[in-house]
Image (cartoon, helix red, strand yellow):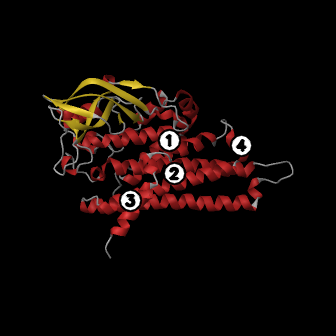
């Protein structure tokens, strides 16, 4: 049987997880991934998980990509978050000409980060000019290139539109050295991600350093992975990180329960029927969430590989599974945190940071309750 694309990523992630766990306190303190962690991620090819094989990437199947992120997230959520973000950003390589993609991704360190869609770029001879500031650029402190998703204005300042009347949006790419980074990420969780803002002033972007993101007709590389698009890939990425955080938090609660005596008069937590039942139910919740997410991704990948189509049904299924998994992971973390009692509030113990990280994840766009409305609307619109 042939191996799935990306086989070995989880094993490499597991091998460097102890290093990441040792660096987690420093990552939290400095609000940056440490140089040793970044070096380990690069040396093991983990940033290249979703890069096309023709460029030296793994072009991993979603299941392999998610397993990699789970392993890293068990050690440190901020590291996994940055790795997932930058890995998905690298999917834009499939929409660039080969020389441009080589320049961005095969010149060390070959890491791309970007933030939320905002602002405009104006058409000029040979490319575009832009003055703007963008937010939420996770992983930008490790990146050699930055990107931005902008609406396009013609040379006369008139907004350009697509055939269906929607605004033309392009992804522009430029060296990180061309931008000014603003240290604004003072957040309750995912502190080490450096999810900062970045700004450019009257920057010229050559045409070849722009692309239409998540537009099938704009793909220059035909691998099935790139039919999924970055939106769905981000959903799977965030959900996988949440599973890793939940797994680590529940494991810490289990380890605590095996040895903790709440008081001199009480027996060990492990002998308490209420604790035993709570751990059993929570373990079932976590396993169910993981099984659902991976089964959804596997079914989607099987169909996509066979047909070349990422359908609306696939998109809806991925969205539902990812959102529900993040919410279930948050419940698992909450249960484990409360189970630990007063032990959980001390920074020296493995609960407090994961609690904050998980609730930062649950506030992100991929975990919005409105996703359930979108899926419900699609279900109700189906004809029998």
Residue drawn at the location 68% of the way across and 37% of the way down: 346
Tell whether 308 sits left or right of 68: left
Tell me which residue sits at (67%, 35%) in the image. Answer: 348
Quick one: which residue is furthest to the right in this view? 265
Query: Which one is earlier in the sequence, the residue at label 3 or at label 4?
Result: 4
Determine contact: label 1, label 3, CB under 8 Å. Answer: no
Look at the numbered discs 1 and 4 and tell me whether their residues touch, using CB distance below 8 Å.
no
* Quadrant location of the C terminus in the rendered image: bottom left
Q: Is residue 245 above or below residue 139?
A: below
Q: Which mark is residue 15?
A: 1
Say few, some or many: other residues with alpha carbon within 10 Å of mark 2 (under 14 / 14 to 19 / 20 or more). many
Q: Is residue 26 left or right of residue 317?
A: right
Would residue 231 be found to the left or right of residue 260 on screen? left
Earlier in the chain: of badge 2 and badge 1, it is: 1
The mark closer to the camera, 2 or 3, is 3
Rounded to the nearest angstrom, the CA distance separating label 2 from label 1 is: 19 Å
The one nearer the camera, 158 or 250, is 158
Q: CA distance from mark 2 to mark 3?
A: 23 Å
Which element type, helix, strand or loop, lies under badge 3?
A: helix
Q: CA distance from mark 1 to mark 4?
A: 29 Å
Could you classify mark 4 by the number of other residues whose Cα lies within 10 Å: few (under 14), some (14-19), or many (20 or more)?
some
Which residue corresponds to mark 3?
374
Residue designated by label 2:
243
Which residue matches tag 4? 343
Q: Earlier in the sequence, mark 2 or mark 3?
A: 2
Estimate how packed mark 1 is, as few (under 14), some (14 to 19) or many (20 or more) residues with alpha carbons within 10 Å. some
What's the CA distance linking mark 3 and mark 4? 40 Å
Report the number of numbered marks.
Answer: 4
């Amino acid at each position: 049987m042939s191996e799935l694309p990306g086989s070995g990523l989880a094993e490499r992630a597991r091998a460097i997880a102890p290093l990441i766990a040792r660096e987690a306190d420093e990552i939290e303190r400095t609000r940056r991934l440490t140089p040793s962690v970044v070096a380990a991620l690069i040396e093991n090819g983990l940033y290249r998980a979703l890069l096309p094989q023709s460029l030296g990437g793994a072009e991993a199947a979603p299941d392999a990509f998610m397993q990699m992120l789970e392993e890293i997230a068990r050690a440190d959520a901020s590291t996994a978050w940055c790795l997932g973000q930058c890995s998905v950003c690298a999917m834009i390589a499939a929409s660039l000409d080969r020389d441009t993609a080589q320049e961005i991704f095969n010149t060390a360190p070959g890491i791309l980060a970007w933030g939320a869609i905002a602002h405009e770029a104006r058409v000029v001879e040979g490319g575009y000019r832009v003055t703007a500031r963008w937010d939420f650029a996770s992983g930008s402190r490790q990146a050699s290139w930055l990107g931005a998703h902008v609406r396009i204005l013609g040379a006369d300042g008139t907004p350009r539109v697509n055939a269906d009347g929607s605004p033309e949006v392009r992804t522009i790419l430029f060296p990180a050295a061309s931008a000014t980074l603003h240290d604004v990420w003072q957040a309750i969780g995912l502190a080490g991600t450096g999810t900062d803002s970045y700004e450019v002033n009257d920057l010229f972007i050559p045409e070849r350093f722009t692309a239409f993101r998540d537009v099938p007709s704009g793909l220059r590389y035909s691998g099935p992975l790139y039919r999924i698009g970055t939106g769905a890939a981000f959903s799977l990425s965030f959900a996988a990180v949440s599973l890793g955080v939940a797994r680590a938090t529940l494991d810490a609660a289990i380890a605590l329960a095996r040895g903790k005596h709440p008081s001199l008069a009480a027996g060990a937590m492990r002998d308490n029927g209420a604790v035993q039942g709570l751990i059993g139910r929570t373990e079932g919740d976590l396993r169910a969430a993981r099984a659902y997410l991976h089964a959804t991704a596997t079914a989607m990948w099987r169909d996509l590989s066979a047909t070349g189509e990422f359908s609306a049904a696939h998109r809806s299924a991925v969205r539902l599974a990812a959102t529900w998994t993040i919410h279930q992971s948050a419940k698992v973390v909450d249960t484990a945190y409360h189970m630990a009692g007063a032990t959980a509030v001390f920074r020296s113990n493995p609960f407090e940071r994961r609690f904050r990280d998980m609730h930062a994840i649950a506030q992100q766009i991929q975990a919005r309750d409105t996703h359930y409305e979108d899926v419900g609307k699609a279900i109700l619109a189906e004809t029998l």
